[in-house]
C-alpha cells in the first residue's frame, strides 16, 4: 500500500463531500495550491502540523484521514453511490451521462 496515494484519496473524498476546492483547502491550511494538489495526487505527504490543520478544516479526527480500508469495500461503495443517486437528481443525470459516454450503458 502506498500511504501517500491512499492518504490523498481519502483527503480528496472528504474534501469534496465538504464542497471545498483544492484552492480553498490550500488557503485554509496555509500552503500553495500546487503543494496541496501534490498531496491529493499522492506525490507528497503533508507535514505533521499541516495534518492537524487539514483535520480541523475538514472537521474530522486525524485518525479518520488514515482509515483507508473503506476505499476497497465494494458493498460500502455501492451503498454510498446508490444513496447519492437516490437523493441527488443532478448527480444521477451526471452519472448517467458519464456512463453512457464511456459505453457502459
Image (cartoon, rainbow, N blue to C red):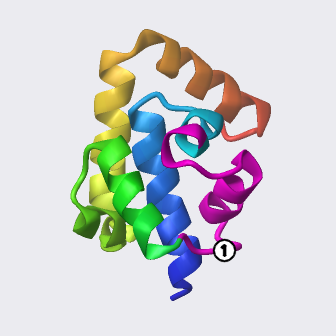
In the depicted structure, whether residue 27 falls above or below residue 43: above
Q: Magenta segment, which residues?
A: 27-46
- Compared with residue 27, is residue 7 higher up or lower down, i.e. above or below? below
Does any portion of residue 26 appear in the rendered image?
yes
Residue 31 part of the magenta-drawn span: yes
Query: In which quarter of the view is residue 41 placed?
Result: bottom right
| Residue 84: x %, y % from top left | 35, 28
Q: Does 11 sit left or right of 36 as displayed?
A: left
Q: State the quadrant of the C terminus.
A: top right
* Location of residue 15 in the rendering, given as x and y in whole percent from the top left corner: 46, 42
* Residue 91, x across and y down, in percent: 50, 21
Q: Residue at x 37, y 43 (%)?
A: 57
Q: Is residue 61 left or right of residue 45?
A: left
> Residue drawn 43% across and 74% down?
48
**In this image, 76 relative to 14: left or right?**
left
Q: Residues within 10 Å of mark 1 (few under 14, many from 20)?
A: some
Residue tagged by mark 1?
44
Q: Residue at x 58, y 39 (%)?
A: 27
Residue at the spot 61% in from the left edge and 59% down from the top edge: 40
Is 40 in the magenta? yes
Corner quadrant of residue 18: top left
Q: Nearer the viewer, residue 46 or 9?
A: 46
Question: Where does the image place residue 53, in percent across and percent down from the top left?
Answer: 39, 54
Which secondary structure, mark 1? loop
- Of all residues, the one furthest to the top in this rendering is 89
The image quarter in which residue 64 lies = bottom left
Amino acid at each position: 500500500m502506498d500511504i501517500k496515494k491512499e492518504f490523498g484519496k481519502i483527503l480528496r473524498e472528504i474534501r469534496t463531500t465538504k464542497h471545498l476546492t483544492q484552492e480553498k483547502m490550500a488557503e485554509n491550511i496555509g500552503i500553495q495550491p500546487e503543494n496541496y494538489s501534490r498531496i491529493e495526487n499522492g506525490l507528497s505527504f503533508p507535514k505533521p502540523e499541516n495534518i492537524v490543520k487539514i483535520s480541523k478544516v475538514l472537521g474530522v479526527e486525524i485518525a479518520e484521514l488514515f482509515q483507508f480500508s473503506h476505499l476497497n469495500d465494494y458493498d460500502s461503495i455501492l451503498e454510498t453511490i446508490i444513496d447519492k443517486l437516490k437523493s441527488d437528481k443532478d448527480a444521477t443525470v451526471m452519472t448517467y451521462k458519464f456512463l453512457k459516454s464511456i459505453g457502459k450503458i
